[in-house]
Image (cartoon, helix red, strand yellow):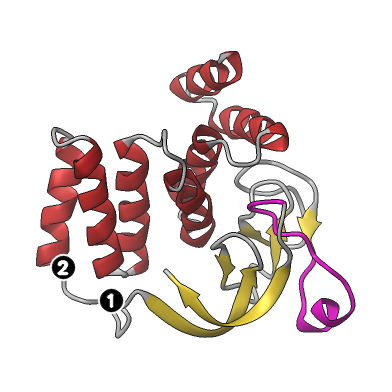
Amino acid sequence: MLERERVGVLNQLGRTVDAVQAALQILKTRLRDWMGHFYVGNRLDDCDELWGARNHLLIACDEEHARAETFNTLGVVYLGLGFVLRARQCFEAALQRDATLERAKRNLARTWEAQPPHDFANTLQVEGPGTGCTVCPAMYPMTEDLPVLCAACCGRRPVGGKCPYCAHDDYVPWSDELADVASVICPTCHIGSLVKKAQFSL
C-alpha cells in the first residue's frame, strides 16, 4: 500500500512530523489501520506522551496483522508508565509472534528486574474517575499543563499553539461540565465519545 510506504520513507528520512501526519491521513479513511495507529503511537512514545501512545498502540495490537514490534513498543510504553505486569504481557505477546525479536527478549528480562515504581505496577485495572472512550480502550489522564487533547493524534497538549506531536491546529475541548451537555468525539478512535469512567482496564 503506497500510503504506508510513504509513512515509512518519511520516518526513515527523519521527517517524523510529516510521517505522523501521513499516518493520520490513513486513519481518516481506515479508522482501525494497525500501521497508522502504530506510527502515531510510536511518535507519541518518542515524545514521552505515553498515555496517547498507549491508546493508539492498543488499537494497533488488536488488529490481526499487527507485527511483533507493535506489541514490543506497547510494552515499552507500559514500562514507562510503571505498569510492569502489563508490560510483561506485551513483551510475551511480541515473542509469541516473533520468537527471534531480541528487543522483546531484553525488555521482558527488564520486567523481572524492575522494582515496582507504584502500587499499580502489578495490576491490570486502575480506578477512576477518569476520562475515557465509550468504544475504544483510550484513557486520558489530563493535567493542568496539558488540559486538552489534540483533535488529530489524541496527545494531551496545551490550549495555545500547534500540537507539539503532529503540528495540528485543533484540539478537543474537555471538561466535566461539557460532558453533561454535549458529545465529545474520542480523538483516538473517532467513533466513541469521551465520558467519565470509574474504572479502566490497562
Instruction: Tell me which amino acid carries mark 2.
Output: Ala
Q: Where, by quadrant of the figure, is residue 121 drawn?
A: bottom left
Q: In front: 183, or 107?
A: 183
SS at mark 1 in the image: loop
Mark earlier in primary sequence (2, 1): 2
Q: In front: 83, or 197?
A: 197
The quarter in which the N terminus is drawn is top right
Q: Is residue 20 left or right of residue 82?
A: right
Q: Position of residue 132 (x, y in %)?
A: 62, 70
Q: Is residue 69 left or right of residue 55?
A: left
Residue at x 25%, y 44% (from the top left corner) = 94
- Range drawn in magenta: 173-190
Q: Where, by quadrant of the figure, is residue 12 drawn?
A: top left
Q: Position of residue 99 (x, y in %)?
A: 14, 37
Residue 114 tag number: 2
Q: Furthest-right residue in view?
A: 181
Residue at x 70%, y 75% (from the top left corner) = 195
Instruction: Tell me which amino acid carries mark 1.
Output: Ala
Q: Position of residue 25 (x, y in %)?
A: 69, 31
SS at mark 2 in the image: loop
Q: Is residue 133 left or right of residue 107?
A: right
